Amino acid sequence: MDIDYQMLLAVAVEEARLGLQECGVPVGAAVFDLQGHLLGRGYNRQMQDGDPSIHGETHPLLWNEDKGSP
């Protein structure tokens, strides 16, 4: 199976744009398995939530495909 790495990166860029639209820091991230299935996505929400632990790198770990972003 060939994985489209540009598409994977586009997911993280889309998340960064969401953060920027909310006047936050434009850092997005996405987590995929080895087959390219999306496991999590998110963006830096420190400014929006007032929570210093919600970095672009940690937000995807809280994400659930059934629920969407926390």
Image (cartoon, rainbow, N blue to C red):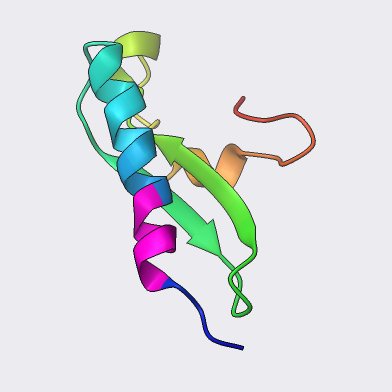
Q: Residue 52, located in which quarter of the rendered image?
A: top left
Exactly how many numbered labels are in the figure? Answer: 0
Q: Is residue 43 toward the left or the right of residue 26 in the image?
A: right
Tell me what residue is drawn at x 38 percent, y 32 percent. 53
Tell me what residue is drawn at x 61 percent, y 71 percent. 33
Question: Where is residue 30 drawn, in percent x and y?
Answer: 46, 52
Q: Residue furthest bottom?
A: 1
Question: Where is residue 2 drawn, in percent x and y?
Answer: 53, 86
Tell me what residue is drawn at x 79 percent, y 36 percent. 66
* Main secondary structure found in the magenta portion: helix
Q: Is residue 3 toward the left or the right of residue 55 in the image?
A: right
Answer whether residue 55 is visible to the viewer in this image. no
Q: Is residue 40 toward the left or the right of residue 8 in the image?
A: right
Q: Residue 16, located in which quarter of the rendered image?
A: top left
Q: Residue 67, located in which quarter of the rendered image?
A: top right
Question: Where is residue 28 drawn, in percent x and y?
Answer: 33, 41
Is residue 60 rendered magenta in the image? no
Q: Quadrant of the C terminus?
A: top right
Q: Quadrant of the N terminus?
A: bottom right
Question: Where is residue 5 drawn, in percent x and y?
Answer: 39, 71
Q: Is residue 63 toward the left or the right of residue 22 in the image?
A: right
Answer whether residue 12 is visible to the viewer in this image. yes
User: Which region shows up in magenta?
Assistant: 5-10
- The one nearer the camera, 1 or 38, is 1
Tell me what residue is drawn at x 55 percent, y 64 percent. 32
Taking 11 as reference, is 24 above or below it? above
